[in-house]
Image (tube, rainbow, N blue to C red):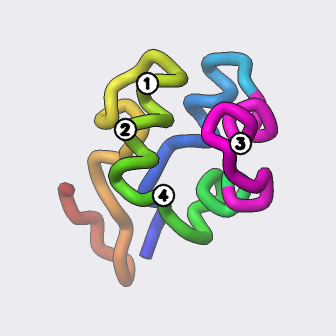
Amino acid sequence: MGDINRLKLVLVEQKRTSKWLAEQLGVNPSTVSKWCTNTSQPPLETLIQIAQHLGVTIQDLLRDTVQTQGVKRKL
């Protein structure tokens, strides 16, 4: 499955670090790193908190398409 979230890009756009976000959420920096690399995904409740801390919408954090087995699918 392709990248689902745009967290890494949004952090760069906001000039924030994954360490900063980890501190804001009270989670381990390695957890945020996994989210940024799309190795794992944050729970919906956490995604809402991330959007609030970054001043963006949840939609801003998500890709609108996902690449699966060479086929692009609209989310």
In the image, is residue 25 above or below residue 68? above
Q: Is 45 positioned to the left or the right of 72 in the image?
A: right
Circles 1 and 2: CB atoms closer than 8 Å:
yes
Amino acid type at image mark 1? Gln
Magenta: predominant secondary structure element?
A: helix
Residue 31, x across and y down, in percent: 69, 60
Q: Which residues are the magenta region?
A: 17-31
Amino acid type at image mark 2? Ile
Q: Which residue is mark 2?
A: 48
Q: Residue furthest front?
A: 26
Amino acid type at image mark 3? Ala
| Tag shown at residue 52 | 1
Q: Quadrant of residue 30?
A: bottom right
Residue 53, x across and y down, in percent: 52, 23
Residue drawn at x 43%, y 76% as measured from the top left: 1
| Tag shown at residue 22 | 3
Residue drawn at x 76%, y 55% as measured from the top left: 28
| Tag shown at residue 35 | none
Amino acid type at image mark 4? Pro
Q: Could you give the CA–CA distance between mark 2 and mark 3, rounded to whole angstroms?
A: 14 Å
Q: Could you give the CA–CA distance between mark 1 and mark 3, rounded to whole angstroms?
A: 14 Å
Q: Which residue is mark 4?
A: 42
Residue drawn at x 62%, y 20% as measured from the top left: 13
